[in-house]
Amino acid sequence: MTIPGACRSMYQILILIIMVGTPLAAAAAERPLSLKEALSIAMTGNPQIRALGQSMLAERENIGIARSYLLPKIIAEERFMRTNNPAYAFSIKMNQKRFSGADLAGAPDTFNRPDPISDFQSSLSLEQALFAPKAVIGVDMAKKEVAARERDFGRKQEEVVLSVFKTFIGVQTAKAFVQAAEMAIADAQAHLRVAELRYQEGLGIYSDVLRAKVAVSTAAERRVSAKKDLETAKRALGLMLGLTESIDVIPEKHEVSVREIEYYYAALASRKDLAAMEQRAKNAENQLRMAKAGYLPVVGIGGSVQSNDHKQPLGAEGDSWQVMAFLRWELFDGTKREHERNKARYKITETEEYLSGMKKEIAFQVYESYLGVGEARDGQELARAALESAEEGMRILNVRYENSLASMMELIDMQTSLDASRAGTVAKDGAYLVAVANLWFQSGTIFKELGIERDGGI
């Protein structure tokens, strides 16, 4: 079927709208979020936080496992036996309360060579430890390890917050790069118009027009790369939030404050990973207590009820009960306890060394981060000064070119410097915010500075 010209034109326009509208629809579907909204979603949606949260819940169960050794043990058991063993046959018949005078007939042959006998034995037994020092210490160790895991979880939350902040700033920076690329294209197109006008009026040469066109194409290529980086940054932000789609950001100015370094040194004591190491140092001391407790006995009580039947399970031809008290004292174990005690002492020293080194390393990280903030601030100021100089140089060179006092090559070189200065300013602004956030992270104050509650709320 032949499509008329007017219809063909409408058909082509429709196809073009569909092709162009598809990425626009995808872009429109991107959810714009503020920084606080992004952080709030990350606290519950980030895969690392969710996984470590489950790990922490699993660790808490160890408290119940350790405490179970202090609770009574109740065991129900059903046994079946068939035997002609003389001692067993004699005792089984007595337990079943079926022993009679007839069993004495023919003794001792009836005792020495009994007929096979069956027995269903049902029992319910209980055992309760009254003095079990290793079990008591085990509960305390489980609690301290849970406390350490909770602090590990808090530190992981801080890491995620820092990553989300960096990625959020990365999206803002990428958008600024796109804007800078758009400005570069506009400037290059303006240079092209001037070059074409001068050529048409006989005041310029055609090579200037060609150079200007190349500059426009180069600027357009930079814009393509900047847009690709922007889309990548948006998808990376969505990934940090535990989402599969791209996330846009709501433009906002981030007010950050930097205090004297003494403030950050003072805040180090609250760093979550340091607190976790301190809990594990206490558990190293518990390991020594556990090793020493191995020299002590375990005291407890117990009892059981029992029924026996020669025909059916859970039968009750005969029943009995018993109660007991016990003291278990391992007097010699091949020097195992001595080695465990020595090992625990070495572990205490090892943990103390790790803790001491960790405190020094954290102090260094804060010092390094603080210097990084100063460096980023200076770089930010220098980048802005360079941008002002480049803009002024571009303005002057434009006038000189229009008056035939400068070449197109000089104009393009200055435009390249201006583009680089714009990009440098954008990058330095983002780097300063990231440097400040890193200082907050290293000092353990990032939640406080960003106004985030520990339960994940903002």
Image (cartoon, grey):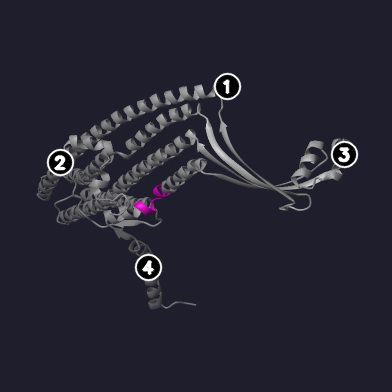
State how far apart marks 3 and 4 are (Cα): 106 Å
Q: Mark 2 and 1 residues: CB-CB less than 8 Å, in contact?
A: no
Q: Is residue 275 magenta?
A: no
State the residue position of label 4: 16
Marks 4 and 2, the one that precedes in the sequence: 4
Name which residue type carries label 3.
Thr
Q: Nearer the viewer, mark 4 or mark 2?
A: 2
Distance from label 1 to label 4 (Cα)? 86 Å
Give the extent of the magenta segment: 43-50
Q: Earlier in the sequence, mark 1 or mark 4?
A: 4
Q: Is residue 47 magenta?
A: yes
Q: Classify mark 4: residues with Cα within 10 Å, few (<14), some (14-19) or many (20+).
A: few
The residue tagged 3 is 110
Q: Is residue 293 above or below residue 161?
A: above
Image mark for residue 381: 2
Q: Amino acid at mark 1?
A: Gly
- Give the residue type at disc 4: Leu
Label 2 vs label 1, nearer the camera: 1
- Can the viewer see residue 368 in this picture? yes
Answer yes or no: do the residues labelled 3 and 4 have beta carbons within 8 Å?
no
Sequence-first disc among 2 and 1? 1
> In terms of depth relative to the viewer, which is nearer, 271 or 167?
271
Viewer-nearest of discs 2 and 3: 3
Labelled pair 2, 3 in contact (Cβ < 8 Å): no
Marker disc for residue 334: 1
